Amino acid sequence: MSLKGKRIAILAEDLYQELELWYPLLRFRGAGAEVVVVGSGRTKVHNSKYGYPVEVDKSAQDVNADQFDALIVPGGYAPDHMRRYPAMVSLVRDMALKGKVVAAICHGGWMLASAKVIQGKTVTAFFAIRDDLEHAGANFVDVEVAVDGNIITSRKPEDLPAFCRAIIAALGGEPKCPACNIPIYAGEPWD
């Protein structure tokens, strides 16, 4: 599996869920992708729910959708803060409208709802935001990972291996089954 030459944005704000940010960041860097942590511009460091810091590489005001192949929205309560910054919401919307991979896990679905990119899409998320996603016009399903076009969603940290496999497949890093569009995956020691 190689993501060499791919550029992936991971959004960050205070109260992010540690695993949902760090697992994809390290997994994709290890696969050769350039991973850029994008923040609101409010501060250079954001702390997780338990105080673990992540340093921001770029502000959402200083990047655009053309610079990335994929965007990931981790969960925790960070998405509730992210959606208060128009540049962050616009980045998600622009990525989705350009057909780029937009992936959200857990409460990350809030950003997809605020960006208005899930109308008519099949998505999953942490069960507590189901109503929010359905009110935004999405079809909610309780599955490990949902892929609808360029939108990829998962529910919780336990789903991270499947979530990352789906992102890798969408970026062309793994073959997919022609009958069901599910990644054919040989596995990694950490999955």
Image (cartoon, helix red, strand yellow):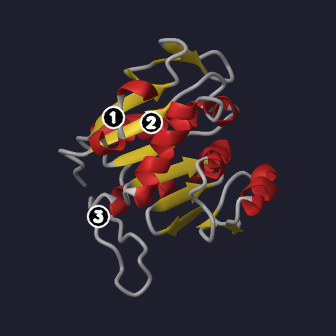
Instruction: Name which residue type carries label 1.
Output: Val
Q: Is residue 99 above or below residue 189?
A: below
Q: Earlier in the sequence, mark 1 or mark 3?
A: 1
- Residue 85 x, y percent position in the rendering: 59, 29
Q: Which residue is mark 1?
A: 35
Specify whether residue 152 is in view: yes
Q: What residue lies at 66% left-to-right and 25% top-to-bottom?
A: 15
Specify the quadrant of the image occupied by residue 66: top left
Instruction: Name which residue type carries label 3.
Output: Glu
Mark 2 → mark 1, Cα distance in angstroms: 7 Å
Q: Is residue 117 above or below residue 147?
A: above
Specify the quadrant of the image occupied by residue 83: top right
Label 2 crowd bin: few (<14), some (14–19), many (20+), radius 10 Å: many
Label 1 crowd bin: few (<14), some (14–19), many (20+), radius 10 Å: many
* Res 174 label: 3
Q: What residue lies at 63% left-to-right and 39% top-to-bottom?
A: 75
Query: Nearest the camera: 8 or 176?
Result: 8
Q: Which residue is mark 2?
A: 10
